[in-house]
Amino acid sequence: MGKDCGKHGDDDLRRSCRRLLATIVVLALTVGVVALIVYLVLRPTHPRFYLQDASLRQLDLSNATTSTSTLLSTAIQVTLASRNPNERVGVYYDRLDVYASYKYQQLTVAASLPPAYQGHGDVGVWSPVLAGPNVPLAPYLADALRQDCQAGYLVLQVKVDGRVRWKVGSWVSNHYHLFVTCPAFLVTAGGNGAPGAAGFRFQTTTYCHVEV
């Protein structure tokens, strides 16, 4: 008789465990489905970035050129703006690293911007100085840079590499990778003759390509 009672007790415990596990699974699926529905209904739009200004302070190619590289020292101050276009979704900028590049080669050290939060319609503006002392350039890139400066027309890219999160009410998403590319059009009144910052001016505000 005692053995039967023990067996019934084990069966009840197993049934209780199965019910508890099933309840936990259902709750987890429900929360996941609700979060997915909220995300699909609101469908966050990526933030919009604009390059408002770019001031070239330094652009010096070293005379010491090897068969493999030429050293470039550059400094550029940029003014970046971003706007959150979402009506019900906030954006956390947890990390924003900004740097300048030329023909896909990074020219400056990445400058880290302070973390920020943007509600609906909020605008953020940053003006970091991007500097790159003695960056080695391949000979073909150094030649292309000299030719662009000679023509008085220079196109750099200001890039942002970061991580963002979406906020809907009290719910906050996981991190998403943010990558922004902004063309910086710089021109002179006439041919400059040699690389250098003097005479180059920012042409116009440009819209940036944003990937999230």
Image: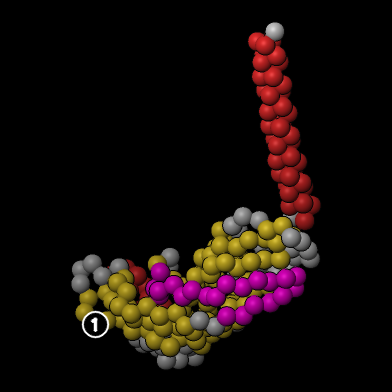
Residue 110: percent from left, percent from top: 44, 72
- Most distant residue in the front direction: 2
Residue 203 seen in the figure: no
Q: Residue at x 55, y 75 (%)?
A: 114
Residue 144: percent from left, percent from top: 37, 73
Magenta residue span: 106-126
Dot 1 falls on a residue whose secondary structure is: strand
Q: Residue at x 76, y 61 (%)?
A: 169
Q: Which residue is mark 1?
A: 63
Q: Is residue 104 left or right of residue 81?
A: left
Q: Residue at x 66, y 19 (%)?
A: 10
Residue 187: percent from left, percent from top: 50, 84
Q: Is residue 93 left or right of residue 36?
A: left
Q: Is residue 40 magenta?
A: no
Q: Residue at x 59, y 57 (%)?
A: 175
Q: Quadrant of the N terminus?
A: top right
Q: Nearer the viewer, residue 24 or 133?
A: 24
Residue 21 seen in the figure: yes
Q: Quadrant of the C terminus?
A: bottom right
